Image: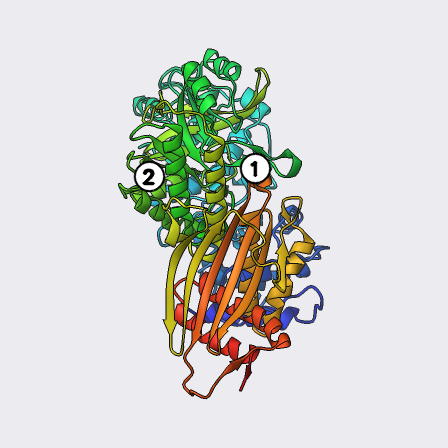
Amino acid sequence: MADQFVLEAQRYLNNRYSGYKGVWVPLAENGQTGTLMIEGLIRAFQIENGVPNVTGYLGPYTVGVMKGLQEISIMDPNDEPNPNVALIQCALFCKGYHAGGITGIYYTNGVNAVKEMQSDASIGVTGTINWKVWMGLFSMYWFKLVSGGNTTIRTIQKQLNSDWSDVLGVQACDGVMSRNTALSLVGALQAAEGLTTWIDDLSLVNFGDATTANCPTLRQGVNGNNIKFNKIAQYGLYFNGINQRKFDGVFDSDMSYNVSQFQDKYGLTGMINDDAGVIGVSTMKSLLTSKGDTGRLALACDCSTVLNAKQASDLYNSGYRYIGRYLTGTVGVGAEERSKALTISEIKAIQNAGLSIFPIYQDGGYYSEYFGKTLQGSYDAVTAIQRAKRLGFTNGTTIYFAVDFDCLEYETDGLIIPYFRQINTVFNQSGINGKHYKVGIYAPRYVCTKVYEAGLAEYSFVADMSTGFSGNLGYAIPENWAFDQFFEFTFSSSPSFDLDKVGFSGRDSGCRLCENQPDFSDDELLQEAREKYVKNIAKATGYLDKIVGTELSFDNAEYNLGTIAGSGVSMSTKLKLSTSLNQHPNSPYSINISWEGDDLSPTCKSQIEAVSAMYESDVELSSLITTTLEEMAIGAKVGTISFLATPISSTMLRINIVCETDNLMDFAGVVGNVSCEFESIITIYPSDPSIDFEFNGEALVIGVTVAVVACLVLISSSGTGVLGLSVLIESLGKAFAVA
């Protein structure tokens, strides 16, 4: 909603600074504050005060200029207007404070507004414009409690500003847990230790060696000089989900009890040297960072290495009792690519050594787009269940599905929750999940908690090692946590390998003894590779739901994928699977899948673009074709994609899209061939019986592409079949000569 005072500020700034060509960026005069408005204010300040580089960014140099300005006290109404005062008045309006007007005269209304801001930010109520007023008003922060904000968090934020703004700068007091609020605790600790007098950028703060060496031990009854440290610890207790309600710096019996609760809840008891209820450096690290003390003991671990008997035995002898291993997948790219998937022989080695296994599924999951792909959750669920069953994991084992990126709140709501709903739908089908496997999640704290609270995960495997993830900073560990990954190192064995240390809560003990299974035969491995190849392509084309959970045959088998019908046209599609290749050697269009590093090669992409460019007049449709073909190529990984259109009659057209390879070795490490063919029969029902679609050489070449384009629209646009069919009619009308 537009604010008349913000609008006044926008008009003032545009009018005063529009002459500064190349540095001034005109503001939208819409009466709305936000990032662009604050950037405009900073840019105006930089112009007004001779900052060499006008960036709109409140960096160390600009803050230094603010510190060097003469403080401004109440002015006489007859004084000459001060341009800096006018900027302060604009900023006050944009932060929700009523400054009276944009006069350049710092008088009653302006002074009262500054006092209100100083009170909200807890930076000393003087009514004088000093560097803290400048920094606070020209930051992206808010100082009033916002909708959904937490009053206790705001109390902590205000205390941090009151105690440490000389070192940390002026931070938000909006009641919202943020990255900077979490990092402020570490910065305050370093200031309390005397390690710093000013921090330019909180994002660069870390709990390093110096902070560790100077961290005091805190205990009940020892206050005095420790009060400043005790307060920081109290903030940390609250942020970690402990019922700490006093933030006075007094280490009393209640605080000692809360520290003990924290140590137990986070699996620290017996793993660190700190006594119960006492905050040594190990406990302090866990209070202020997600990974905590990386030197602490751990009962669990995980790795991507396929272990031998010696490695498994060495793990047990080093104190580990639980290990996370991957059900499927590879790590590395190109020549460095290797399997990370569990094998039958590895399971025997691990369990003979005395270790239990908690299975992890991650065949992607390290970027947000992965979770938005059609039926990705269903595909992953079926794949994980089938693999776990084949490996002999016993009834009720929890499988942890990975969300391995810095997932933000909107991505959690829009992508991750729907993904786990799909997984749960599959897991709840006894015909697929006869072993009653449970759903677990591997993710940052916030994501784990949201998925758990939605009833979509039995247990959480927390990615606490990623301390910079927004979903870890300042969030409590999920209530259902079973495993807590906190440190990666090279484990000494024969050969040595990378290992992650993992905290253990006792909620999930993994699978101690898998059911005896014979080693995978060559035929089983080949069948598995072919099924994965086909399902990858079906996922890219939007047909995965038609075959998910089906044990596929490759002996020239056919599967009906359904019919889509619209006004004047219908399309029936079936999937044809075979081990014979080159079924359509005369295809006028073919894409040879090739790679350059970890991306499709420029040659491959140009071949894809040659197909999509046939419909370049429709940018949205062309982009859809490119995306679909790239996803098909990425899913297939090797081989070719070819297209063929064949007239059946004057009103019927057969379209074949064929993905095939004779190089399953590069796809899945087994020798063999596979052909996956989508065959669609398109029937036109012209309103005019005299209409006849004729095919000639030139028209056929164009028609192949256009028809394939239309077909891909139908296949990849979930839930828009009728719309796609109308596009198809239009496409065919352009492609073929009408008699």
Image position of 226 with respect to 373: above or below:
above
Element on which disc 2 rests: loop
- Residue at x 48% of width, y 74% of height: 727
In the image, 182 versus 486, the foreground residue is: 486
Q: Earlier in the sequence, mark 2 or mark 1?
A: 2
Q: Which residue is mark 2?
A: 457
Residue 494 occupies quadrant: top right
- Residue 428 position in % (x across, y down): 28, 43
Q: Which mark is residue 612?
A: none
- Residue 370 position in % (x across, y down): 48, 49
The answer to whether residue 174 is seen in the rendering is no
Image position of 670 with respect to 713: above or below:
above
Q: Which residue is mark 1?
A: 671
Image position of 70 with respect to 358: above or below:
below
Q: Residue furthest right?
A: 52
Q: Residues within 10 Å of mark 1 (few under 14, many from 20)?
A: some
